Image (cartoon, rainbow, N blue to C red):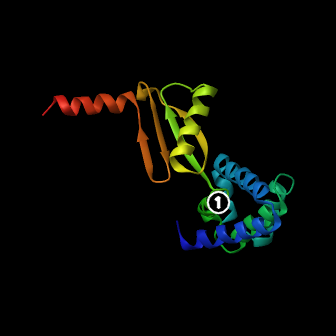
Amino acid sequence: MTELAKEYGTALFAVGKEDGTLESLSEGLVTVERAFAEHPPYRILLSTPNIPMKERTALLDEAFAASVAPTVLTFVKLLCEKGHIRSFEECKEAFDALVTEDRRTVVANVTSAVALTDAEKATLIERLQAMDGRAVTAVYTVDASLLGGVVVEFDDRIIDGSLKRQIHRLKEVIEP
C-alpha cells in the first residue's frame, strides 16, 4: 500500500470517526468500488486530462450524489481533482483497515469445500474469537477442490484444515 493511499484513507477515517459516520462512509466506498469494477472505462474517463476537471467532477455528481454520503462524494472528487482516482482501491483498503482496527474486529476469509450451516459458522466464529481475542467477521467462500474441511485466513495466519492439505501431507510422509 502506498503512502498516498495511507494518507487519504487515514484522512477519510478521521473525518468519519469525528462525525460518527464510519458505517455510512464504508457503505459509500463499497458503492463506488462496485461502480468502478462494473464499468472500468469510467475510471479511465475520470483520469483523462483532456476532459476538463469540471466535467469530470460533474460526472461524479451525476453518478453518486444520490447513492453515497456527501463526504464520500467529496472524497472521490478530491481523488479525481488531484489525479489520484486510480488509487481509489488502495485508499479504500487503508480506510477499511483503520475501521477494522477501530472496531477491534478481524476479518477472516473462510473457504470450505461445501457451504457451511449457520451452526457451523457460529461455532467457527466462536473458536476464532477465543483464539484471537477480538471480534471476528467472516467472509465465506466455497471451493470444491478442497475436498472437505476448511481453510481460514486472517491477519497473517492461515489455518488449513482441508482434506486436500491432509492428503498432501500424507503423500509427503509416504513418498521419500
Closer to us: 125 or 25: 125
- Visible in this render: residue 49? no
Task: Tell me if 21 is positioned left or right of 164 in this view.
Answer: right
Front position in the image: 76 or 56:
76
Residue at (81%, 62%) from the top-left corner? 20
Position above or below: 24 against 144: below
Position of the C terminus by quadrant? top left
**Numbered disc 1: secondary structure:** helix
Image coords of residue 103 (percent x, y): 67, 56
Going 58% across and 38% down the picture, which residue do you hit? Answer: 126
Question: Residue at horizontal 63%, vertical 69%?
Answer: 84
Residue 119's x, y, as percent? 62, 26
Amino acid type, mark 1: Lys
Q: Is residue 32 left or right of residue 152?
A: right
Residue 88 shows in this picture: yes
Whether residue 111 sits left or right of residue 17 in the image: it is left
